[in-house]
Image (cartoon, grey):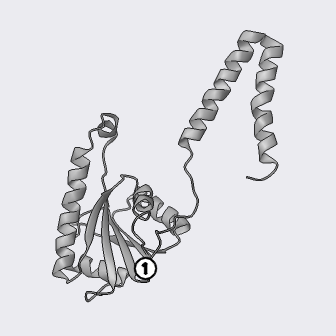
């Protein structure tokens, strides 16, 4: 934060409260102070840290994290992923981890019913792992947070990825494009985004 912002923020909070006390008396001053406190809480709750995303300490080997937003079964799509990840032909030196976000609807999140989203993500992973296995690529699989960036950040705490590949559906999915932009900006590991027609 630049040096001038903190005094400006304090003044923006204090001046309306003091003015409320002076103009409307204690009742108005307390009400304005309460509104300021609520505004601070809302802004703080909506803010997300935007620092760099680093991987866990590595062991000198290649570790490729592939984030799949959909099931990938088509051999052409599998080949495109393998090329983007640099693991075509079964690179035995690379450890591959597949990560699928558990996407849920607003109502499911509100009711904390995330089972359907987790099952759908697991189905995507099973199909994709089997398709990669046909192409002689071994991979582990994990289900992650529904937020793509948060899922990657969580996984990189334990998986020392040297490269991250995001695979999203063709069709202009805005969530994946926004996540790709943020990952490209924040990831310390090498990042690539592959857009494919999902099966």
Above or below: residue 12 compared with residue 186: above
Percent position of residue 197, x then y: 27, 69
Above or below: residue 22 compared with residue 119: above
Percent position of residue 16, x then y: 77, 25
Judge by depth and name the residue closer to the eye, 193 or 141.
141
Above or below: residue 135 compared with residue 17: below
Determine the residue positioned at 82% across, 48% down.
4
Determine the residue positioned at 45% across, 60% down.
153
The total number of labels drawn is: 1
Q: Quadrant of residue 45?
A: top right
Work out which quarter of the rendered image holds the C terminus and state it.
bottom left
Q: Quadrant of residue 83?
A: bottom left
Determine the residue positioned at 36% across, 85% down.
86
Determine the residue positioned at 70% across, 22% down.
33
Question: Is residue 15 among what the camera can see?
Answer: yes
Badge 1, how many Cα within 10 Å: few under 14, some, many 20+? few
Judge by depth and name the residue closer to the eye, 30 or 92.
92
Question: Is residue 74 among what the camera can see?
Answer: no
Q: Quadrant of residue 125?
A: bottom left
Percent position of residue 169, x then y: 32, 64
| Left/right of residue 19 with respect to residue 42 in the rendered view | right
Is label 1 in a helix, a strand or a loop? loop
Q: Which residue is mark 1?
A: 59
| Left/right of residue 25 with respect to residue 45 in the rendered view | right
Percent position of residue 109, x then y: 33, 39
């Amino acid at each position: 934060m630049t040096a001038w912002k903190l005094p400006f923020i304090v003044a923006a909070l204090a001046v309306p409260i003091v003015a409320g006390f002076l103009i409307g008396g204690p009742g108005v001053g307390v009400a304005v102070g309460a509104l300021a406190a609520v505004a601070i809480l809302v802004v703080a709750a909506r803010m997300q840290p935007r620092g760099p995303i680093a991987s866990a300490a590595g062991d000198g080997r290649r570790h490729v994290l592939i984030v799949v937003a959909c099931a990938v079964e088509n051999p052409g799509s599998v080949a495109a992923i393998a090329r983007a990840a640099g693991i075509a032909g079964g690179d035995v030196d690379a450890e591959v981890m597949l990560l699928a976000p558990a996407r849920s609807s607003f109502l499911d999140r509100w009711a904390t019913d995330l089972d359907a989203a987790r099952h759908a993500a697991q189905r995507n992973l099973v199909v994709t792992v089997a398709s990669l296995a046909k192409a002689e690529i071994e991979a582990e699989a994990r289900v992650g947070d529904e937020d793509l960036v948060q899922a990657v950040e969580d996984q990189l705490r334990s998986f020392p990825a040297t490269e991250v590949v995001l695979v999203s559906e063709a069709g202009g999915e805005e969530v994946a494009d926004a996540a790709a932009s943020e990952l490209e900006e924040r990831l310390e590991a090498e990042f690539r985004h592959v857009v494919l027609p999902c099966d």
